[in-house]
Amino acid sequence: MQKSRSYRDLEVWKLSIALVKEIYSITAKFPASGIYGLTSQMRRAAVSIPSNIAEGQGRKSNNIFCQYLDTAIGSVGELETQLIIAKEIDYISAEIMDSMLVILDWIRKMIRSLSRKLP
């Protein structure tokens, strides 16, 4: 499979952008005391997912693109953990956590599928 003309054409990138917006919305409701802790970590992890997809897609080789996709998958795991922590400390409900975990699982599967399709 050839790389897309632009990362903006990738459905996984589009879904990841929507995730970032949702994470910003969720974390905006966190206590102000958490702004430099969990809020910041969650936002960075979320932003890292589409950013690594975009940066990797722009690289010269598919091998390098795959490395960036692996980094994006790592950020998915990081954000999952942070969502679990947010739920455990009562920053979010179980329902919000569960819905975000479903989206993250879907993003992970899409990234893995994209990676497998690259020569």
Image (cartoon, rainbow, N blue to C red):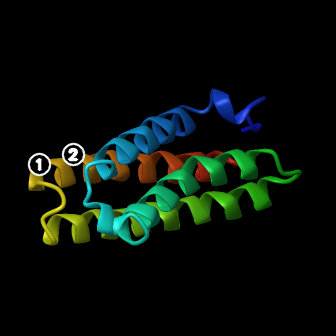
Residue 106: in sight, yes or no? no
Label 1 with label 2: CB-CB less than 8 Å: yes
- Please state if 24 lies on the left or on the right of 67 as rendered: left
Report if residue 40 is visible in the image.
Answer: yes
Find disc 1 in the rendering and name its residue: 95
Q: Which residue ends up furthest to the front in the rendered image? A: 32
Location of the N terminus by quadrant is: top right
Secondary structure at badge 2 equals: helix
Question: Toward which corner of the image does residue 33 lie, by quadrant?
Answer: bottom left
Q: Nearer the viewer, residue 66 or 23?
A: 23
Q: Residue 83 versus residue 90: which sits nearer the camera?
A: 90
Mark 1 is on which residue type? Glu
Q: Which residue is mark 2?
A: 99
Q: Amino acid at mark 2?
A: Ser
Q: x%, y% of residue 113?
A: 52, 48
Q: Residue at x 69, y 45 (%)?
A: 54
Asked if residue 34 is positioned above or below residue 114 in the image, the reply reads: below
What residue sits 43% from the left and 38% below the top?
21
- Looking at the image, which is closer to me, 38 or 84? 38
